[in-house]
Image (cartoon, coloured by chain):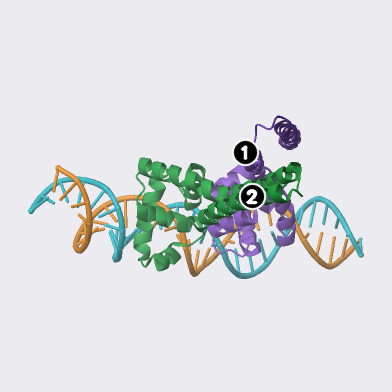
Chain colours: A purple, B green, C orange, D cyan
Amino acid sequence: MKHTILVFGGLILACLLLFRVSEYALVSGDLTVEIALAVTALLFLGIGLYLRQPSPLKEAPASTVLVDEAQLKSLGISAREHEVLGHIAAGLSNREIAEVLFLSESTVKTHVSSLLSKLDAKRRTQAVERARVMGII
Amino acid sequence: MKHTILVFGGLILACLLLFRVSEYALVSGDLTVEIALAVTALLFLGIGLYLRQPSPLKEAPASTVLVDEAQLKSLGISAREHEVLGHIAAGLSNREIAEVLFLSESTVKTHVSSLLSKLDAKRRTQAVERARVMGII
DNA sequence: ATAGCGGTCATACTAAAGTACCAAACCTAT
DNA sequence: ATAGGTTTGGTACTTTAGTATGACCGCTAT
């Protein structure tokens, strides 16, 4: 949010400056059009570069959260299963997950098996990879 | 590589076009300096935006590769082990890794065991998580 | 209220992963 | 050429993961 405001504020300022300078250049006549164009080109090239920079930091998390909910529903993954999936990705064993979630290892195995079939994976490592690709981690 | 060439080629072309147009505009006199400046601004703004777009695809791997090498050496992880690590992260079983790399399952197990101790992990899932945090994937 | 779903747990089994220990072939640098 | 690390492979074993099946409880929508 703050970044967007900064960027557009900067753009507006840059435009104003640009036309002021061009006016001055024409009146005084000590600046050729080529130089003005070159400066403009460099200026806006820099602005474009700066604009792009943080955009991945903004789009990535947003898309992740969105894909999260949508994908989970479309795959029929329950909240509990998603919780287990997170612990699998963290590298915990079934027994450790059971201890963390106050469950029996049997229950964890049930959830894991269910997850594997829903994610169309044969191993927990594959499930983690698929989930990561889908953005549900 | 190809992308870099395209980008710089495009930049050079844009510069040439820019000066040609400015020449023509001055000679014919039917274009105001402001319009030329505006066009230039837009053009290079677009170029800047385009330039930045694939840069995360180029910088991110670059930084990853840097951390890669450093971390791998400090942990004593060999090239072959790193290769196996990648396949583990992709969700392959030991047997599948063996088939892909034309090895016996025994050898893969040896590499995996070595990886686990070097990454201070108890399970392959944990090894993947640690490797991911360290940026060696 | 009853059928269905999510969550829990158990048993019994097979498959995969991981450990320990050993050993040979191959580079590479001294 | 010889020491050391890497890569490869084996056997034998324990542990963990995963499957299959059945069962019970609680909630909820029809």
Task: Same chain for labels 2 and 1? Say yes or no.
Answer: no
Q: Residues within 10 Å of mark 2 (few under 14, many from 20)?
A: many
| Residue B29, horizontal then vertical, whole percent | 74, 48
Residue named by callout 1: A35
Q: Nearer the viewer, residue B97 or A64?
A: A64
Residue nearer the viewer, A128 or C26:
C26
Disc number placed over residue A47 in the picture, else none: none
Point 38% across, 60% down: residue: B108
On the picture, is A18 further left or further right than A130? right
Q: Amino acid at mark 1?
A: Ile
**Left or right of A135 in this view: B30:** right
Mark 2 belongs to which amino acid?
Answer: Leu
Which residue is more in the foreground, B78 or A18? A18
Task: Chain letter for mark 1, please.
Answer: A
Residue furthest front in the image: B27
Q: Using the numbered discs, state the Cα–Cα distance from disc 2 to disc 1 in whole angstroms.
A: 12 Å
